[in-house]
């Protein structure tokens, strides 16, 4: 019989794990989530990425019963493959020379499944991925979070993942839409920044400038600085949205 | 001219603060920093209920039916009138109007957050809350510590940097601040011994947001001086509510009291219960509430400071023992910021309450966690894995949240105890807190 003390210890360590996971998740999100990141048993969807020339296809659901099946084909040759957390009883995979067919299920205690493979001499990879016998493209993450395909059966070229890595942070979610909204609503954006700027200058005036001799000059300099910031933000937003 | 502006300044920030130049400068600095924080959050975040509030207002404008939201009719009228004005001035709001009229909640929400004008709309939608928040800042200055500008300044500082105020109004975007401003006005009238007006204004506050009803008995017991007062104040209360009900009945053919009594919000008062045998059960909050009211009733010399402290006790007890929505915690703030000046540890406990609330609220799911950030990038935040599935992956999420809920209750009850201790000192010496 486990003692109360042991149970307490277990409980506390679980809470610490959760808090660490949440912190880790927020750090990854704040840093722009440059790679693909998902929490097995919590995240929902397909996650596809390239690592050391191997292609990884994994899927996860938030501890509900779900079926993931699909087909992957290429004009190259599949030379090797590895399965991840594959349950022989429920999950089926058939590997051909240039195609892979799979069907797998997840449940409350089966957090995620997947496979990885090496492919040579190929120009494209074609995917046909389903969740619960239907298509949900917003749940297919290609190379990074929310890089979703546009068609139900989609192809990616050999250099797709390299191109994706080269894409700057401001063209990725959530920054891309945020900057787009700020720029499409530019009158509001600049008015808002201007008001915030005035308040900051006023704070500086009553705290720092009031003790200095050249108050007026510092004020004028601050407003000039604010004007420069406004112009710089305009060009920056224009560049981000180009 | 100078005298005129001095008079205005003095009437805004109180005479004591205005005449103490050091306090005045600090107050201005706090005000600016507070305003900066508020404006920083204004355009970017909201919880779905803000949209519902303006959807009801849009429906009211569209149909001309002012009794559309009969539970919060006055709140709806305020939002409807404001929406009419901003719709006339800002084309962005006019463009969003069909989205507000959309009946399907998911479609309207997606239409709103994905709209390029969402930041303008959110700023305008939340602007009245900023105005009422500012009204509260200056009303609360007047409620305590007359002749003590430094303490008044601390009240102002604790309000303006209060995390709950900033969170509920500018991130969560709920309208409770309107009723809180009215309640503070009623408290000020009570302090100035305008007893009948105080009750009338408080009843208006109740019509706005029901919660001031919890301090109505305290108000009556504080304001009555003789039997005649009991009769008049009770009549104001009874006729006020009856008049409101009749007005609603004849004008809109709807009841206001019955839906309120049957609403789930009213049931929250009875959410904690002690099951006895068969049908017999004790509603814990109701029982404790009666104890609080009776303890106030039996105080011979009821000072205004005691009324404020009892207000804090009532609302802290409510959030300790009842099911609540995050914005309801805001009702504790006006009373606690004043009590915190007497006992600074209450301020730290308020920060702890806020931190715990941030954990407790995740159980409501994506709607009030990830979706709050959806205006920034709707696709990103809708698809983002919320905290509940992550917690559920390792531990029972309800149990996890309830551990924090229990700590929250413990902290809140400890705060009640600290205020109760202050009450005893207040009764003995006329002032309470750390420095006694």
Image (spheres, coloured by chain):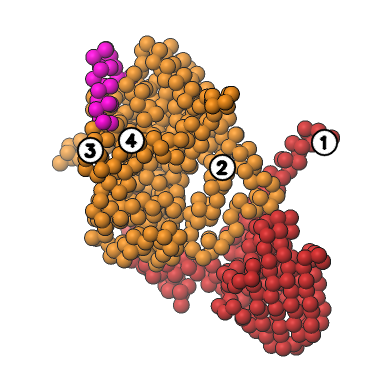
Chain colours: A red, B orange
B198 is higher (above) or lower (below) than A130: above
The numbered mark 2 sits on a residue in which chain? B
> Cα distance, mark 3 to mark 1?
65 Å
**In this rendering, position of residue A28 left or right of residue B95:** right
Identify which residue, B85 or B241, lies in the foreground: B241
Q: Residue at the spot x=24%, y=25% of the render?
A: B236
Identify which residue, B11 or B95, lies in the foreground: B95
Q: Which residue is mark 4?
A: B257
In what element is the residue under mark 2? Answer: helix
Front: mark 4 or 2: 4
Visible residue check, residue A46: yes
**Residue at mark 3 shares a chain with residue at mark 4:** yes
**Residue at mark 1 shares a chain with residue at mark 4:** no
Q: Can you give x and y, in whole percent of width and height, for residue B69 in the image?
A: 32, 47
Q: Residue at the spot x=48%, y=59% of the render?
A: B374
Q: On residue A2, which mark appears? A: 1
Q: Residue at the spot x=80%, y=75% of the render?
A: A81
Q: Which residue is mark 3?
A: B247
Magenta stretch bounds = B222-242
Q: Is residue B103 magenta?
A: no
> Cα distance, mark 3 to mark 4?
12 Å
The numbered mark 1 sits on a residue in which chain? A
In what element is the residue under mark 4? Answer: helix
Q: Which residue is mark 2?
A: B360
CA neighbours of label 3 inside 10 A, class few (<14), some (14 to 19), many (20+) = some
């Amino acid at each position: 019989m486990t003692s109360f003390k042991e149970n307490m210890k277990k409980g506390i360590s679980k809470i610490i794990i959760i808090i660490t996971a949440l912190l880790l998740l927020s750090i990854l999100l704040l840093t722009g989530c440059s790679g693909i990141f998902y929490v097995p048993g919590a995240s929902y969807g397909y996650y596809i990425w390239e690592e050391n020339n191997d292609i990884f296809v994994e899927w996860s659901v938030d501890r509900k019963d779900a079926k993931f099946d699909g087909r992957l084909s290429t004009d190259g040759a599949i030379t090797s493959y590895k399965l991840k957390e594959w349950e022989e009883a429920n999950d089926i995979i058939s590997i051909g020379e240039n195609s892979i067919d799979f069907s797998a299920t997840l449940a409350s205690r089966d957090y995620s499944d997947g496979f990885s493979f090496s492919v040579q001499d190929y120009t494209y990879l074609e995917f046909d991925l389903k969740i619960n016998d239907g298509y949900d493209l917003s749940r297919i993450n290609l190379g990074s979070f929310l890089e979703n395909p546009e068609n139900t059966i989609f192809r990616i070229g050999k250099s797709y993942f390299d191109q994706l890595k080269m894409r700057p942070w401001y063209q990725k979610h959530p920054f891309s839409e945020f900057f787009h909204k700020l720029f499409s609503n530019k009158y509001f954006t600049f008015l808002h920044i201007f008001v915030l700027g005035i308040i900051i200058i006023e704070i500086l005036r009553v705290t720092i400038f009031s003790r200095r001799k050249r108050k007026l000059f510092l004020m004028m300099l601050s407003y000039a600085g604010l004007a420069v910031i406004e112009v710089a933000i305009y060009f920056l937003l224009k560049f981000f949205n180009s | 001219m100078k005298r005129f502006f001095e008079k205005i300044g003095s009437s805004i920030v109180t005479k004591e603060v205005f005449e103490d130049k050091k306090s005045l400068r600090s107050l201005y600095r706090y005000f600016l920093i507070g305003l900066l924080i508020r404006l920083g959050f204004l355009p970017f975040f909201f919880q779905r209920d803000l949209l519902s509030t303006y959807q009801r207002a849009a429906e009211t404008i569209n149909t001309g039916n002012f009794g559309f939201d009969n539970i919060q009719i006055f709140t709806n009228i305020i939002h409807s009138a404001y929406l009419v004005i901003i719709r006339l001035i800002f084309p962005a709001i006019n463009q969003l109007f069909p989205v507000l009229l959309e009946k399907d909640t998911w479609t309207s929400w997606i239409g709103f957050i994905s709209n390029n004008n969402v930041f303008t709309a959110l700023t305008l939608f939340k602007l009245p809350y900023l105005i009422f928040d500012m009204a509260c800042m200056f009303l609360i200055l007047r409620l305590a510590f007359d002749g003590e500008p430094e303490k008044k300044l601390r009240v102002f500082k604790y309000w303006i940097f209060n995390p709950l105020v900033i969170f509920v109004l500018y991130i969560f975007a709920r309208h409770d601040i309107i009723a809180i401003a009215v309640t503070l006005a009623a408290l000020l009238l009570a302090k100035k011994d305008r007893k009948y007006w105080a009750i009338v204004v408080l009843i208006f506050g109740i019509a706005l947001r029901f919660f001031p009803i919890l301090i109505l008995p305290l108000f009556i017991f504080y304001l009555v001086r003789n039997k005649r007062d009991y009769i008049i104040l009770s009549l104001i209360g009874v006729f006020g509510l009856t008049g409101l009900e009749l007005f609603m009945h004849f004008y809109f053919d709807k009841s206001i009291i019955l839906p309120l009594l049957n609403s789930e919000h009213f049931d929250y008062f009875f959410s904690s219960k002690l099951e006895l045998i068969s049908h017999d059960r004790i509603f814990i909050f109701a029982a404790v509430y009666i104890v609080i009211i009776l303890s106030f009733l039996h105080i011979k010399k009821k000072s205004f400071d005691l009324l404020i402290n009892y207000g804090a006790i009532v609302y802290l007890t409510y959030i300790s023992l009842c099911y609540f929505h995050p914005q309801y915690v805001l009702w504790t703030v006006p009373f606690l910021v004043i009590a915190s000046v007497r006992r600074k540890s209450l301020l730290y406990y308020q920060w702890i309450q806020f931190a715990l609330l941030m954990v407790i609220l995740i159980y409501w799911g994506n709607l009030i966690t990830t979706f709050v950030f959806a205006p920034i990038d709707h696709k990103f935040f809708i698809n983002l894995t919320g905290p509940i599935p992550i917690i559920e992956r390792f531990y029972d999420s309800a149990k996890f949240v309830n551990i924090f809920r229990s700590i929250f209750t413990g902290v809140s009850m400890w705060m009640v105890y600290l205020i109760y201790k202050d009450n005893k000192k207040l009764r003995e010496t006329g002032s309470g807190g750390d420095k006694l």
